[in-house]
Amino acid sequence: MMPLNYAILDYFTHTDRACADEIIAALAPRYGKMRGLRKAAVIDALMTAEKNGLIEEDGCDLDDGDDLRVYYKASEEGRATIRKYVG
């Protein structure tokens, strides 16, 4: 099993765009018991990946509870970099 932060990044090589809630739902079967899969930790991981140029913001909306939901995507260059380092 790859480290959780790698799995978060790898998710962007398999989808066009995603928000923290979608990533948590997708990774919960394998990583559900890890503290790093909490929403705040996943958002931190996404923001770090954005600052490092691996992903970029791709819009936002409000969820059913009126909480902000930010979507991210990986460019082709970002996907290539993720694949290179994550595997």
Image (cartoon, rainbow, N blue to C red):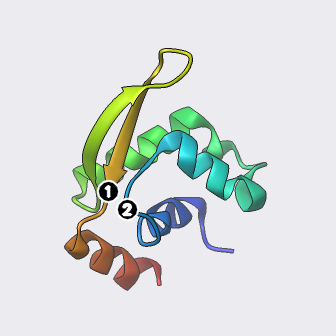
Q: Where is residue 52 in the image (x, y as percent from the top left)?
A: 25, 57
Q: Where is residue 44 in the image (x, y as percent from the top left)?
A: 43, 40
> Which numbered dot is residue 16?
2
Residue at 29% in and 80% down: 80
Label 1 crowd bin: few (<14), some (14–19), many (20+), radius 10 Å:
many
Per the image, the residue denoted by label 1 is 73
Q: Which amino acid is tagged 2? A: Asp
Tell me the element at label 1: strand
Whether residues under marks 1 and 2 lie with C-beta atoms below 8 angstroms apart, the answer is yes
Looking at the picture, tell me which residue is in the foreground, 42 or 35: 42
Residue at 48% in and 69% down: 10
Q: Is residue 37 left or right of residue 31?
A: left
Task: Report the residue that reaches farthest toward the front.
Answer: 64
Residue at 50% in and 25% down: 63
Q: Is residue 53 above or below residue 14?
A: above
Residue at 28% in and 62% down: 54
Q: Is residue 87 left or right of residue 55?
A: right
Label 2 crowd bin: few (<14), some (14–19), many (20+), radius 10 Å:
few
Q: In this view, does 22 lie to the left or right of 49?
A: right
